[in-house]
Image: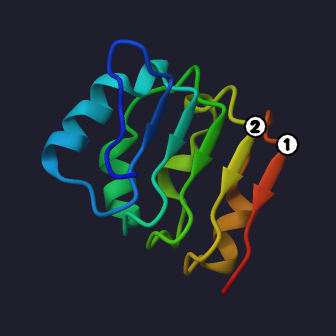
Amino acid sequence: MIGWIEPALSQEFSVHAPMNSDQNRQLQQLLPSLKFLDLSQTRLTDTDLSQLFQQELPSLEELNLDFCQVSTLGPLLHSEWFPRLKTLSLSGNPLQPSALSLLSLPSLLQLTLRQF
């Protein structure tokens, strides 16, 4: 599923390939209302995440960043931006050991970190 979206109705956004500029723009508009965001296998880096997550995501409950290129979790360290995040999946990322020690998401119920 590449770039599947129904902009007026969706609470989900899923991309399974590197994002193009149209998908990025579309995602920026939807971020505040999304409940589920799947960016797995998009090769997003820490810099990409910092550019993407520059605002509070009050509705986001699930975030999948499996098999990206995330190592420091920069923007995810702003717990006030993710007040409802319950599920975070980071499998297959080159995470630095110190990244997880800084992670503080009070509503988080499930964290997936499988390494392959």
Please identify the residue farthest to the left as the structure is shown. 21
Q: Which is nearer the eye, 1 or 68?
A: 1
| Position in image of residue 12 (x %, y %) | 49, 31
Q: Mark 2 or 1 closer to N-term?
A: 2
Quadrant including the C terminus: bottom right
Q: Amino acid at mark 2?
A: Lys
Q: Quadrant of residue 115?
A: bottom right
Q: Which is nearer the eye, 33 or 2?
A: 2
Left or right of 35: which side holds 20?
A: left
Label 2 crowding class (10 Å Cα cut-off): few <14, some 14-19, many 20+?
A: some
Q: Quadrant of residue 36?
A: top right
Res. 86 mark: 2
Residue visible at 58% across and 21% down in the picture: 59
SS of the residue under disc 2: loop
Is 27 placed above or below 112 here? Answer: above
Q: Amino acid at mark 1?
A: Leu
Res. 109 mark: 1
Please identify the residue farthest to the top as the structure is shown. 8
| Position in image of residue 107 (x %, y %) | 79, 33
